[in-house]
Image (cartoon, rainbow, N blue to C red):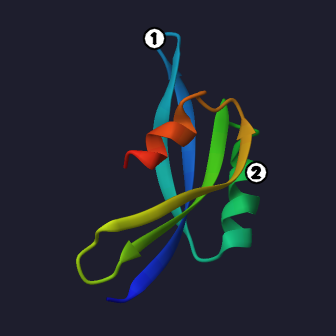
Amino acid sequence: MAMKSTFLVQTFVIKRKRLVPGDREVSPTESGALKKAEAMAARMPGTAALKVVADDETGELKAATILGQFGEVPEDFAESLQGA
């Protein structure tokens, strides 16, 4: 069982006066994800840099960690990752 870490930038947009997840972008490194999230937060209501660890063979999610948050992020975002 080989574990693979993936670094993502999750954007948040406002739809119908609510903050909702927008696009996700993959980043090759943790520092790259943090830099990209911080830069994108200037153009978006909010962003978050994430580290996702999954089984490379089955795709089963093992852990998701928020590396950094910039701008507005939904209050329940961290809780939603635990249920993913």
Residue 51, image x, y percentages: 56, 64
Q: Please determine whether, in this image, residue 4 is positioned above or below residue 25.
A: below
In this picture, residue 7 sits left or right of residue 60 = right
Q: Residue 16 lies in what quarter of the image? A: top left
Asked if marks 1 and 2 touch (Cβ < 8 Å), the reply is no
Residue at label 2?
Answer: 39
Residue 44 seen in this snapshot: no
Element type at marker 2? helix
Q: Residue at 47% across / 36% down in the picture?
A: 21
Residue 11, image x, y percentages: 56, 42
In this picture, residue 35 sits left or right of residue 73 = right
Element type at marker 1? loop
In this rendered view, identify the residue nearer to me: 62 or 50. 62
Q: For label 2, count other residues whose C-alpha is less than 10 Å away and answer few (under 14), some (14-19) or many (20+).
A: few
Residue at label 1?
Answer: 16
User: Considering only order in the chain, which callout, 2 or 1, is on the residue closer to the N terminus?
Assistant: 1
Rendered-image quadrant of the N terminus? bottom left
Question: Label 1 is placed on what type of residue?
Answer: Arg
